[in-house]
Amino acid sequence: MRYSSKAIVALCGISLLMAGGSQTFGQDWSKEQNEIFELEKQYWDLYIAEKFSNLMKLFHEDFITWPHWRPKPIGKIEFVSDVRKQGFRSYELKPMAIKIFKDFAIIYVCYSLIGMDGNTYTGRVGHICIKQGRMWQIIAGYSGGSKADGK
């Protein structure tokens, strides 16, 4: 099933409005919320391990993202091309909210990355996931700011 860009943009807007009522870190999560957080951790594990072909499998065919380093949204090919140029040793995630809307889910996390240069980079990421059959995939994302050692 394909979703138009208008539908994805509308869902992003709705997610921002409704995220205030979602469960935050430390609360009891449903089975589906745990599945979404596991998908998010898998994303970061593959990102750090530079297993980009496996990372691509987590993305829906219509994936679109707006990383903080790009002036406009991009697709999965451009995204993976960009992250191949980066290098990180480890990460920590703090889930801020996970909200399920039937076959869609939104997750917001704050991250801390240790770069190959030894600097710590912090920021936030949001992913919208879609469930097709029994499998969740990331269909959209964005990131906000990344600072090295708080600078």
Image (cartoon, rainbow, N blue to C red):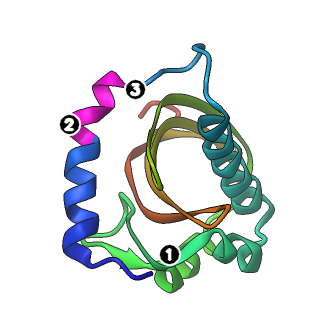
Cα–Cα gap, marks 2 and 1: 27 Å
Write down the residue under mark 3. 22
Which numbered disc, 2 or 1, marks the residue that appears first in the sequence? 2
Which numbered disc, 1 or 3, marks the residue that appears first in the sequence? 3
> For the residue labelled by badge 2, is the local secondary structure a helix, a strand or a loop?
helix
Query: Chief secondary structure of the magenta span?
Result: helix
Q: Which quarter of the rendering shows the N terminus?
A: bottom left
Cα–Cα gap, marks 3 and 2: 11 Å
Give neighbour class at mark 1: few <14, some 14-19, many 20+ (Cα, 10 Å). some
Write down the residue under mark 2. 17
Q: Of the residues shown, which amino acid type is indicated by label 2?
A: Leu
Q: Nearer the viewer, residue 5 or 116?
A: 5
Is residue 129 among the parts visible in the rendering? yes
Is residue 147 among the parts visible in the rendering? no
> Residue 52: horizontal and vertical position, in percent?
71, 75
Q: Of the residues shown, which amino acid type is indicated by label 1?
A: Phe
Task: Tell whether label 3 touches label 1 (CB within 8 Å).
Answer: no
Judge whether 98 appears above or below 1 on screen.
Answer: above
Cα–Cα gap, marks 1 and 3: 28 Å
Write down the residue under mark 1. 79
Q: Of the residues shown, which amino acid type is indicated by label 3?
A: Ser
Which numbered disc, 3 or 2, marks the residue that appears first in the sequence? 2
Residue located at (25% from left, 76% from top): 5
> Residue 30: horizontal and vertical position, in percent?
61, 29
* Part of the protein shown in magenta: 16-21
